[in-house]
Image (cartoon, rainbow, N blue to C red):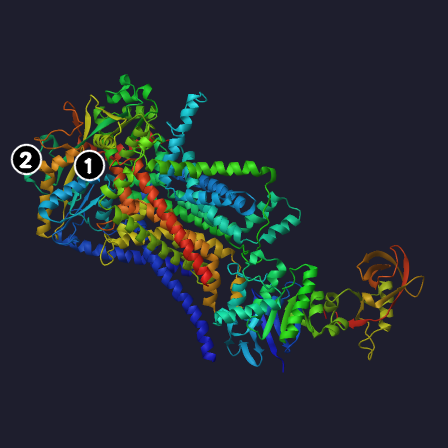
Amino acid sequence: MAYAQLSNISKEYQQVKVVNDLSLNIYQGEIFAIVGPSGCGKTTLLQIIAGLVKADAGSFTLAGKLMSSVDENIYINPEKRSIAMVFQDYALWPHYNVFGNIAYPLKIKKYSHSKQKQVVGELLELVRLQGMERRYPHELSGGEQQRVALARALALKPMILLLDESLSNLDANLKKEMQEEIKRIQRDLLLTVIHVTHDQQEAMSIADRIAIMNQGELVQVGTIEEVYRFPRTEFVARFMGDSNLICPKQDNPAEMKLWKMAGQNLINGKAREFESEQILVVRSEDIKLSEGSGHLTGQIITKNFNGSVINYKIKINDYILKVQAMADSCYEPGQEVSFSIMRATCVCADNS
Amino acid sequence: MLDLIKTKECKFNSWQLLMGGLVALILILVVLYPLAVLLLYSLGVSVHSFDFSLVKYWDAFSDIKTIISIKNTLYIATGVTLMAGLLGGGLAWLISRTDLPGKRIFRVLIFLAFVIPSYILAVAWIELFGRNGFFNRIMKEWHFIDEPINIYSLEGIIIIMAIHLFPLVFMSLSSALKMSDISLEKASRLAGAGRLRTLLSITVPLIMPSILSIGLLVFQQTMACFGVAAVIGLPSGKYILTTRIYSALNGLDLPMATASSGILLLCSGLVFILHNISLRKKRYIHVNSRSQTPELIPLGRWKIPVVSGVAGILTLTTLIPLGTLIFSSFLKKWGMELSLENFTLINYRAIFMEQATAVRAIRNSICFGAGAASIAAVLGATVVFISNKTRLKSRKAIEFAATWPLAVPGTVMAVAATLAWINPPFKLYATPWIIIITYVAACLPFAVRNVNGLMQEMDPVLENAARISGASRFQSYQDITLPVIMPGIRTGWIMSFLMALREIPISIMLYSVGSETIGVLMFNMRSDSGGLETISALAVLVILLTVIGNVLIEKFGKSRMEGS
Amino acid sequence: MRKSTGVFWSLILALALLFSGCAGQQAASDNENKASENQAVTQVYSGEEGRITIYLSGPEQMLADLENAFEQERGDVLNILPMGCGPLAQKVCTEAEAGGIQADVIWGAEPLLYMNLREKGLLQQYTSPEAEAIKPEYKMGDNYYTLCNARYGVIVYNREKVAAEEIPSFWADLTKSNWKGRVAIADAGQSAMALALTAGLLQINDGSWEYLQSLKDNRVILTKQNNQAVEMVSTGEADAAIVPHDGVLRAIKSDKKKGIDSSLAIAWPEEGAISVQRPIAIIANEARPDANNELCQEFINFVLAPSGQQIAAKYGFVSVRNDQELPAGVPNKVQAITLDWENASANDDEIRENFEKIMTEL
């Protein structure tokens, strides 16, 4: 039985379906990421879960308890749902200091002052902000504000923690640090977390399972590996990392040739013969480069050194192929290289 | 359970309706009913007669003098709004965004500038720049000029009203700037925009609701100004609408007076509508926690010129008028030389000894003022709340109704109150209540305007965060929304209290035995040929009271915040 | 949205009509009963028996002296509401329009207001026994109102700014070029006293507006009230002003009390000072208890009696009686021009209109 269950949720704003008949199960103790481009409806979905927005249709159950159901006319107010949320801009209250912000949920629940102090102390230790109680939000850095928001969200030991683009405003190093922090805390507290982001990298590094969302619908749900390795559609493939999409186009012989070659190394759907309309996806890291001439050759046009790997773009007639190679490879732009495709997957076209 | 939840939702909706209805009812009684009676009267509908006609309006508009006075009114209102906006906005920016030294002193000086009654300000400026003023005497002595410069002009009114009102702009924009999201400015700087560009294309648009809101207040307030216009404009025959209203009243032509007031109210309504159109379809939300302490812009080599500029301006706007006021209150006669020989306490003694009702008047003014300011603060905040947070259909009408009295001169307000409250069964006339009710109507716009900008700029996500944290809707309003708009409420309260302490026309027309106010005292002392020095003493007392009130309310506000 | 806003506004309109309408009906039906003239004579008495309310203008100290003297004999029976001439007229006029004048007695301002009220049937006739002693030129109003003091419109000047040879001895002197930009006068539109003075100046000049036009050409400075004109002269902002004399006398006296040699002095124009009188009257009210009617009459008698007149004279007001001395500071030889009030009252709108037309700057 799923811990949190969304069934047939729909929401419309001014005749635009922001969330369209969406169903989703989330299990206890996992970090679940919802990823999609901005405007795909993921924040609205999160707000429906939190109870800040009322769905037009569908129902939401949390831990066996019906939180909202349009059919049965049930709607539990957000404050009664025991769901916590870290907002994109953290939404710290400017007129409370750190202590006041974190202690607020406790105060609402009428904790004694000493108990409040104790809990806030523990939380500050958890997010590593000891001794900052008296500071006001505007005196904190972005990362510190983020941690305060996290501590506040955790104060009441929520059943679910929602993160709404909460890491987007941090710089790369801080982001990494916070990701680890959140993971650590999640493990320690055995939390269920729903993380909404537009950044697939971020989602991949934090989540156990992931849902790709587009135009109000879930395109694919699965573990990170599943979704990465076996994208169901063109959209997912594009969205998850650098991949080459290869169509069997008759008017582009180079691409046709690539398609045929990739088809030989197809790792899914091998049981059946691939159709001529099928799009194949080749991850950039699944292409091996070698010097000299081979079955397939192309010319390197750009080289992008990225520390651990090097990204190349290779031109094969009219087709540009993205390739990721080890850092010790040493090809230069202009050089002719040959390559082979190690692995490919087939996906559905988006318009089908 | 199902039913329970259903009723809860209904409860909020019906609560919304109930609150809206209650506020609407109070507004109708306090504001709209008197103004409606006034307007009906100008149309020929009154207790005595029902003969509807627009003849008074026709008369008014066919008189070239009315047209001139409308033109003059709009001219000074525009001028004052621009000048007070530049002055107040500039100072607000300098003080909250640059490393200007001496900020604390400047802040106090700006606050004090507002505390000086506009009438005293005008007289002090006449002393400086009048025909026989200090400036002209020196210039003449050194033969720089033959003809003295003339302060008695529309421009003179603009300067003095702008000086009187710029602290409002400063206070309002300071809190807006404090709340606004600094990261957006940083982003603009990173995008390669210069400081000036950032200021104009990011900072100013961000706090636009506050700017427009306070601009509207200044504009409407200037339209209703009478005292300064009479002291500065009248001497050279410059009439504005309020002068004409007073003239009609004085000629016992009440219909004409009310018709002229009707024109004034109409202009004011148009300005309000323009203001609302300019805000429509734009969302300005940036009050959120991401705002950090801004990195102060170093003034560098501009530091000294800027500091001396600000100091110079504030000397003119505050120190000189205030100094004149305080010194004069200890002088035997206004304008005498400062010397031990001329020093006297006689003016203060005159207030308490020769005026039989002085103590009672001061006590009354404090009670009426504090009472009306508090009622207006609560009512005003509720009005803003309704207009921003509910979906009631008439919410904008409610907001308009609450701010309408801004353009009504005190005398007209008193006439409206008399017409409205003299007949049983609603007879409040000749009781203290009529003064309090009229004060509430007069204070309400301050309460609304000071909160409105803040409320519009506040990110609703702050309330959502509270909901998520377990607070009910009401709790979130109480714990989050209210404290965020608290500075606005406080400023509104102080402005209202101050207005009540020093206004004359409302209380002189509406007071009865036992409900004398400082305004009555002031008026009687003036017509006793008490001289400006006695008025100064009274004004100093009023300023003292206001400062004490401000300190008290600040303390009260602080302790409340810490307690929560 | 539009619809509900419309409903909202019409509700207010209806309420306003209802409120004022209720009272209106009451007044109208009373009208029918009494078949009185233009307007309702108040039928409801809002005061309490044994206590009368008086709206008056004048120096507060003088009013306090009078109140004390009267109440010494009669006990605490007066509700005195001092206010300036302007507010007095406005208040009385507004109250009359709104439903009924709340005062029992009004005292102060100038005859124009009283003539207007009498015309509307709002004053109650009363012949004081003291009226016999009033000088003939001050008898007017058929006892609907009684003149009880006079103020003289004169020229006040600043002794430090005006050389001895410059001191004006005629009204006409102020239009000479050496007075350019130095003379102040209250606006006839803003102050009824100034309107009376204007009417006087017209009368002196045989109804010609030339005098005021030349004042304007000489850049006369307007003020809102007469005491502001005095203030201007006292602070040196203007060098002379056309004002009533009593305020000047009080200002000089107040300076003297502080041990200052006042800079103010009065020039008495040889054409004559313009005499403007302060009337007193009882407001008509059928419902007023007899005891209160008697109190009103007693108060009027008291103000007109020698003792009352002497208190007023202490504050510079000229008595209307033939058996009283002039106040200190008013020379015996002073010529006083009595205004043609009938004429002024008939033309007051025109006077105000013309005054503003001349003075308004485009």
Name the residue beneath numbered marker 2.
Answer: C132
Kind of element beneath mark 2: helix
Callout 1, which amino acid? Glu
User: Where is residue C225 drawn, in percent x and y?
Assistant: 28, 35
Using the image, name the chain to which the residue with label 2 belongs.
C
Please tell me the numbered disc located at residue C110: 1
Name the residue located 41 percent from the left edge and 46 percent from the top edge: B220
Q: Which image quarter: residue A329? A: bottom right
**Residue B445 seen in render:** no
Name the residue located 70 percent from the left edge and 66 percent from the top edge: A202
In the picture as drawn, the residue positioned furthest to the right comes out as: A293
Callout 2, which amino acid? Glu
User: B313 left or right of A242?
Assistant: left
**Residue B180 seen in render:** yes
Kind of element beneath mark 1: loop
Q: Which image quarter: residue B342? A: top left
User: Where is residue B70 drawn, in percent x and y?
Assistant: 39, 39
- The one nearer the camera, B541 or C342, is B541
Where is C16 relative to C217, above or below? below
Q: Do labels 1 and 2 share a chain?
A: yes
Which quarter shows the C terminus of chain A?
Answer: bottom right
Q: In whole angstroms, how far apart are the C-alphas of marks 1 and 2?
A: 21 Å
User: Mark 1 touching mark 2, by CB under 8 A?
Assistant: no
Query: Dot 1 surroundings within 10 Å: few (below 14), some, or many (20 or more)?
Result: many
Where is C122 relative to B150, above or below? below
